[in-house]
Image: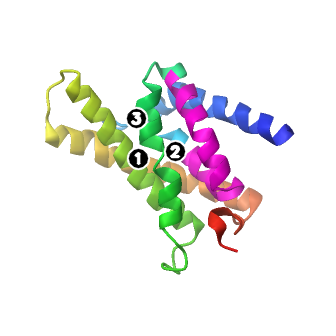
Amino acid sequence: MIRALALAAATIIVAVCQASAAPLFSVAAATPTVVLVFLGLVALYRGETTAMVITPAVAVAEAWTRGLSPGLLLVAYVPLVPLLGAFDPRGLPLLGPGGRLLGAVAVTGAWARVLAAGSVVLAGASFAPGDIVGRLLLPGILLDLALAGTVYGVFRVALGEPGRRSFGWR
């Protein structure tokens, strides 16, 4: 019960950080996606089931704090956990949990930004592929990788390597 309450509190705190602190670290038109790193760490340290259960809650909390569509955020964030499982350490032996996290966060972050850009274009904004790639996608992916690597390093030092219980590899 205490762990569930702590996870619910962390979900709200991360959503508020995404709305208030992340824009302070923007580069060009991109901001780091704190929510993706949080979901990735939950998947690594608490298991993929927990991460998939809280993904809708995180999407709704972020939509509530930022005034965005919760459905669009959910579609953007859902691929993270399957991507973490897709980077199977048995197939890629040099890719540890940190590498899996970085790969999944980069791909999911790019997907989320493409969805956001597409929704803005469908709402009537002008379409400039160079601006989308150069001002949104590339800086956003680099920011997400820097944030994920830093936070994972802190978690790795504080909590140790993630357990092997997630993703069914026993």
| Residue 26 x, y percent position in the rendering | 40, 35
Total numbered badges shown on the rendered structure? 3
Residue for badge 1: 109
- Residue nearest the observer in this picture, 111 or 134: 111
| Residue 87 in sight here | yes
Q: Is residue 108 left or right of residue 6?
A: left
Display colour scheme: rainbow
Q: Residue at x 65, y 72 (%)?
A: 169
Q: Is residue 3 left or right of residue 104?
A: right
- Disc 1 and disc 2: Cα gap in Å? 7 Å
Circle 3 SS class? loop
Q: Mark on residue 36?
A: 2
Three-letter code, disc 3:
Ser
User: Does residue 62 sit above or below 154 in this rendering?
Assistant: above
Q: Residues within 10 Å of mark 3 (few under 14, many from 20)?
A: some
Q: Does the magenta stretch include residue 51?
A: yes
Residue for badge 3: 26
- Residue nearest the observer in this picture, 147 or 9: 9
| Residue 8 x, y percent position in the rendering | 71, 33
Q: How crowded is mark 1: few (under 14 residues within 10 Å), some or many (20 or more)?
A: many
- Disc 3 and disc 1: Cα gap in Å? 14 Å
Extent of the magenta region: 36-63
- Looking at the image, which residue sits at the far right? 2
Task: Identify the mark nearer the N-term, 3 or 1.
Answer: 3
- Residue nearest the observer in this picture, 74 or 130: 74
- Disc 3 and disc 2: Cα gap in Å? 16 Å
